[in-house]
Image: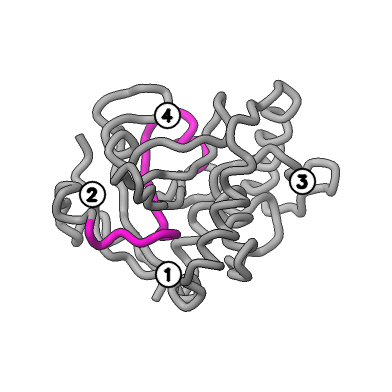
Amino acid sequence: MAIDEDVLRTLKPEPLSAIARRVRDGDILLCSGNDPFSRLIGWATRSPWTHVALAYRWAPLHRIMVFESVQRLGVRTVTLERFISQSSTGQKPYPGKIILARHEDYAGASGDAAMRRLADFAVDRFGDPFAPIEILKIAARIAFGRTGRVTPKFLQPQNEFICSEYAARCYEAIGVEIPWDQRGFIAPADFANDPKTKALAQFQTR
């Protein structure tokens, strides 16, 4: 089932300690934020969903990590504990709400081989900072998304990603496709609108 914005009100926020055991590799972290860049994404997509990331367990260190792409920094990983406690720019507490969700096809693709393919793709893109021209390309894709026009090929992502483009590429590595209209950019809202995505819990941000 798709995720309606009503879950932001109907799902009771729970502490990380109550949710952690339910988190699986590849689960979706769907955010509704109100920091400036989040508001830009919301404006472009006319949706409350402004950021998306993926969870991944780092078993040797007993940590749940988050794979994400953020403005200024590019692709990176942080602990889930940090992810729910502050924004990518360090604003505390996190300025918004965060939903744990799961995609039906990803659950079906689970297994060591699939997890490895997703992790390989995600990790290989860590630490690639955005150059100014890449930021401009991202801004242009957001603008095309607002107008509903098809993004020209030269503006399409190469190694620079909006959060949802990065998450979608990670899923593509294991054969899971997130449907979208092919205009502008694939957005956090496209993850929420996928009928195969289900909301599981809401994190208590702090």
The amino acid sitting under disc 3 is: Gln
Which residue position holds label 3? 156
The amino acid sitting under disc 4 is: Ser
Query: Dot 3, crowdedness within 10 Å: few (<14), some or many (≥20)?
Result: some
The x, y position of residue 108, in whole percent, is 47, 78
Query: Dot 2, crowdedness within 10 Å: few (<14), some or many (≥20)?
Result: many
**Which residues, given as a range, are shown in magenta?**
21-41
On residue 197, the disc is 1
User: Quarter of the image containing the N terminus?
Assistant: bottom left
Q: Secondary structure at mark 4?
A: loop
State the residue in front, 31 or 44. 31
The amino acid sitting under disc 2 is: Phe
Which residue position holds label 2? 203
The x, y position of residue 60, in whole percent, is 35, 46
Tell me the mark number nearer the camera, choosing from 4 and 3. Answer: 4
Disc 4 or 2, which lies upstream in sequence? 4
Q: Are marks 4 and 3 in contact (CB under 8 Å)?
A: no
The x, y position of residue 140, in whole percent, is 71, 36
Residue sitting at 71 percent across and 40 percent down? 159
Disc 4 or 1, which lies upstream in sequence? 4
Q: 36 above or below 113?
A: above
The amino acid sitting under disc 1 is: Thr
Q: Are marks 2 and 3 in contact (CB under 8 Å)?
A: no
